Image (tube, helix red, strand yellow):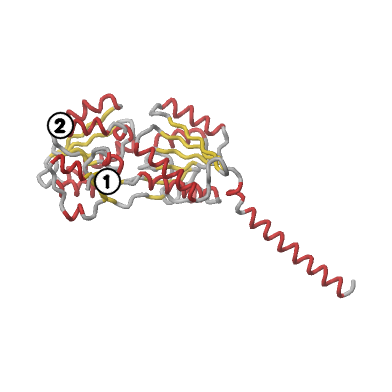
Amino acid sequence: MNKKGKIFLAALAIILLVALYFNKSEDKTKVDDKKVKIGVLQLLSHPALDSIYKGFEDELKKQGYKIGENLEIDLQNAQGDQSNLAAMSKKLVADKNNILVGITTPATLSLSNETKNIPIIMGGITYPVEAGLIKNENKPGNNITGVSDRTPIKEQLEIMKKVLPNMKKVGIIYTASEDNSTKQAKEAEKLAKEMNLEVNLKSVVNTNDIQQVTESVASSVDAIFVPIDNTIASAMATVVKVTDSYKIPVFPSADTMVKDGGLLGIGVDQYKIGVETAKVVIEVLKGAKTEDKAIVLANDGIIYLNNKKAKELGITIPDEIKNKAEIVVGE
């Protein structure tokens, strides 16, 4: 072969290598080009959980995943029914979704019972290790990772004491069937007693007995603390109607619960939880391994204040708190 022939073959080889490189580069972005199927299981409808889903969908769109184009979302809502959770989990797994999302602990547990292979992303799970979902928050070790909505309970109780310096008795209401809520309530009881506060701890079974339980607690305390609790969040109007009649405030653990009549809370931004959940989903779609992906703690310790409720109850919020607070109702 003459010199010109060798040069031609060398040039051809370079062209082929460049073409191969660009083809591989394009393959890396195919996850964004083909339609992705995401199955979402939500425990029930109430403002807090609906806000998580809204943040989730909005962030996916912002990142280029658009429903009807390159994204298909199958949202299943169990409306608080455990049998619905099981049936819907089976459906989402059988439909071969690329990735699954559980909004709340019960929803995620139900999904985990159906598959150990499809990635499951937690959307706002308070205690994922204690719930048996993962082994370690820094290294989950299985097909589950995601976002936690754990709140700083000690700081919440301390701020309650600053708002109500004469507070001697605190009520704590939670749902017995919600493991995350139970754990928070027990922790709050322990911390409150360490602060020399008298505690009236009561649980509800479902929304049907929330009014009766709230009545029994509100009649004997100076304020009520509510942890992250889906059942109570769905019936905040009932809780607030009772506490208003006794002229005592409710200190919840989520921004939406403050909006729904609570006074103040160091809580989580439910919409942000949805945003962070979407970001984790995208990371996993692009190759991140759930077993190695650390849990995201979506809690910036924001103080949410219902200024309108403070005025209604005649409570003066100290400037040191008010100036740092995000006012969700009132001026």
Per the image, the residue denoted by label 1 is 328
Where disc 2 sits, the SS reads helix
Left/right of residue 271 with respect to residue 118 in the rendered view: left
Q: How crowded is mark 1: few (under 14 residues within 10 Å), some or many (20 or more)?
A: some
The disc placed on residue 90 is none
Residue shown at the point (38%, 33%) measured from the top left = 45
Point out residue 30 in the picture as x, y percentages from the top left corner.
62, 50
Residue 117 appears in view: no
Residue shown at the point (13%, 47%) measured from the top left = 316
- The answer to whether 29 is drawn above or below residue 71 in the figure is below
Please tell me which residue lies in front, 71 or 294: 71
Where disc 1 sits, the SS reads strand
Q: Residue most toward the left?
A: 166
Residue 237 appears in view: yes
Residue 238 quadrant: top left
* Real-space CA distance between mark 2 and mark 1, rounded to the nearest whole angstrom: 22 Å
Residue 20 quadrant: bottom right
Residue shown at the point (68%, 56%) measured from the top left = 23
Quadrant of the rendering where the N terminus is positioned: bottom right
The disc placed on residue 245 is 2
Point out residue 105 in the picture as x, y percentages from the top left corner.
39, 37
Point out residue 164 in the picture as x, y percentages from the top left corner.
13, 45
Type of the residue with mark 2: Ser
Which one is earlier in the sequence, the residue at label 2 or at label 1?
2
Residue shown at the point (45%, 33%) measured from the top left = 110
Type of the residue with mark 1: Val
Q: Residue most toward the right?
A: 1
Left/right of residue 85 with respect to residue 186 in the rendered view: right
Q: How crowded is mark 2: few (under 14 residues within 10 Å), some or many (20 or more)?
A: few
